[in-house]
Amino acid sequence: MIIEHSVPAFFDWIYPAARSWIETFLLFLVVSLAISFILCLLRYGFKGAYIPFVYASKRALANLTSSSINRTWAIAKLTIIEAIRGRVIYVLILFLGLLLFAGWFLDPQVDDPARYYLSFVLFSTMILVMLTSLFLSSFSLPNDIKNKTIYAVVTKPVCSSEIVFGRIIGVSIIGTVFLFLMGITSYYFVISELQHTHVLTEQSDLTPVSLTPDTNENDPKRVVMRGRTRATNGHRHDVEILADNTIEVSVVNGHNHTIKIEEVEKSESFKRYIVGTARGSLQARIPVYGELIFRDGDGNDTKKGINVGHEWEYRSYIGGKTSETTANEESAIFMFKNLKETMFPKSKESFQYGLPIEMTVGVFRTVKANIEKPVYASLSVRNPKNGLTVEVMTFGTEESIIKSLVIPWNISGTPQIIQRKGRNDGQHYEMPSRQETAEARNDPTLNARRQFDFFNDFVADGQVEIWLKCIDRHQYIGVAQADLYVRADNASVKLNFIKGFYSIWMRMIIVTAFGVLFSTFLSGAIAMLSTIGVMIAGFSKSFLVQIGIGDILGGGPFESLYRLMLQQNMVVDLESAVYATTFVKHADFIYSRIFLYPIGRAIPPLSEYGIYDQALISGFNIPAAWLLNHSIMTFAYAVPFFFVAYLILSNRELAK
């Protein structure tokens, strides 16, 4: 899973988020008061607008404190009844129709069918739920005002806050019910589509393995038969049957199967093999990430590796040997902390043999040769306290393919003592110190050893380093911090599915609040278009903020237009002491600082919610810290929207 911008820890996030929320709330308050005053101007003129505006603002504050839960719930029920009368149930029927006929168009023979089906149900659910909330929130109040049914409500003792809050609650309940039904249907749809089995017969699919002179006939783990299952959904599984009747099945398309030997009568000369349904297709991996640092060709630590020229600088690269005689110093070092032996119980199947490692790397080839041949890499473990390093394995890497490896608990290899060297704030540092390195190198017992225990020999105070190197000459391997992780365990797939759909619910709440906000002073169609515009801007929040602070190559919008007319490259500096340049710079500063920057700060960062979709589709557990941060952020945005909508509607009613 690609994590370009990781979610910060709660206590690191809450303070700047709270400060940003206060700024946003004050901005919305000023905007709402400005819009309310404009409405009064349009109704009463310049001279008579002040008194109604002040009176309406005081009344709005008084009504806010006297809101009734019963009246608010009555407005919410009215919204739900209107939606049902408006045939909103057809949206759910449309979704069920999509799932019903999806089997005709979705290909189960893709390399990763779980990712394929999850992408389909998440995208279709999000589109339908968001569109439903968008239409209901944008058109509900304007239609009431247009049809004058709103007067039957406002003539009763109902406050503007109750109308706004009731609309938000009503639309949110409809969206929540739809999302709940779609989530249950989607889960069982994905489960049913992924379940399949294979045929395996001893006569046609398995071949006995002959004994060799080096084979121990009494070894219970000796392979006695080897073969492949019949093809289903465009794939097969390699099968090995051991002497103790243990059956090992290869992982294909992210899953494998259990195979049992059925008890048969003695008269039958062949055994029957029962292949179970697919397992492991849906996962919720719990990854343990480490810090990433690189080692250059001179053996010094650096923050980044080699830049191979890709525009997307998510990954940094390490190169292979330059010749057969030179040593390969370039490495990607993943530093893990707080690892404890109790985190990996050896009683469990996943930790029985060793420490599970998974990685997804990039490959850059300078010598193409056979493009299908993988680029080979090595994996080593290092004790950060004494520098003890042992190479664990070599393996082939491919672009964007999840590689599952296991570092054995009992490691065999030749020890090396490697000292890390680097600079931090201008100061040199060495890990470990030269004295500790010398002691380790001169330790005859350590140098003579060839067998090592992972936790006893390499984990020091919960810390261990995993080194990744490129073996092939003139080839490069690219990694980012989230590309290599220790797989601690699996979480509940059902609970992870609920978390993924909860992220859609949070986005729905923001869209609903925006739709109701715009509907208080715009017509239904314009309110819907405005909400769509805000949604689009929400996916470009960081870009708008960068323009606002002037941190964009090529300048702001006025400078970009000026460069476009002059056909000038954006990396070339504009001519100084020129009137046009001065005017463009000042225009960009005023427009970006006064207009774009506040809007960019106020718009909700909808792009951040995409990390939930990515985690669910990629088979990673969604941490509770993500849910806590984004839940607070969702309601922190919804509250100012409610206040703005309430103040605007209060003044609009008075203006009528």
Image (cartoon, rainbow, N blue to C red):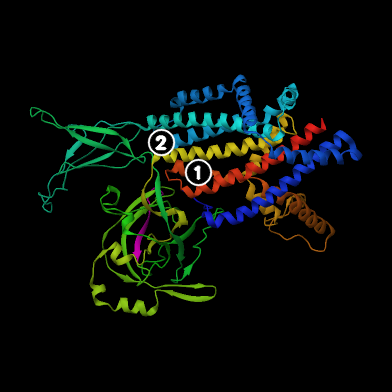
Q: Which residue is mark 1?
A: 612
Q: Which residue is mark 2?
A: 113
Q: Is residue 391 above or below residue 512?
A: below
Q: Residue furthest right?
A: 47
The amino acid type of the residue labelled 1 equals Tyr
- Between 271 and 369, the one lying in front of the other is 271
**Residue 592 location in percent, x, y?**
74, 52
Identify the residue at horizontal 56%, vertical 24% (top origin).
Answer: 91
Query: How many circles with numbers are drawn on the protein?
Result: 2
**Crowd rating for badge 1 (residues with CA inside 10 Å; few <14, some 14–19, many 20+):** many
- Between 83 and 436, the one lying in front of the other is 83
Which comes before the other along the chain, label 2 or label 1?
2
**Residue 232 location in percent, x, y?**
32, 31
The amino acid type of the residue labelled 2 equals Pro
Identify the residue at horizontal 65%, vertical 29% (top origin).
Answer: 71
Separation (CA) of disc 2 from disc 1: 19 Å
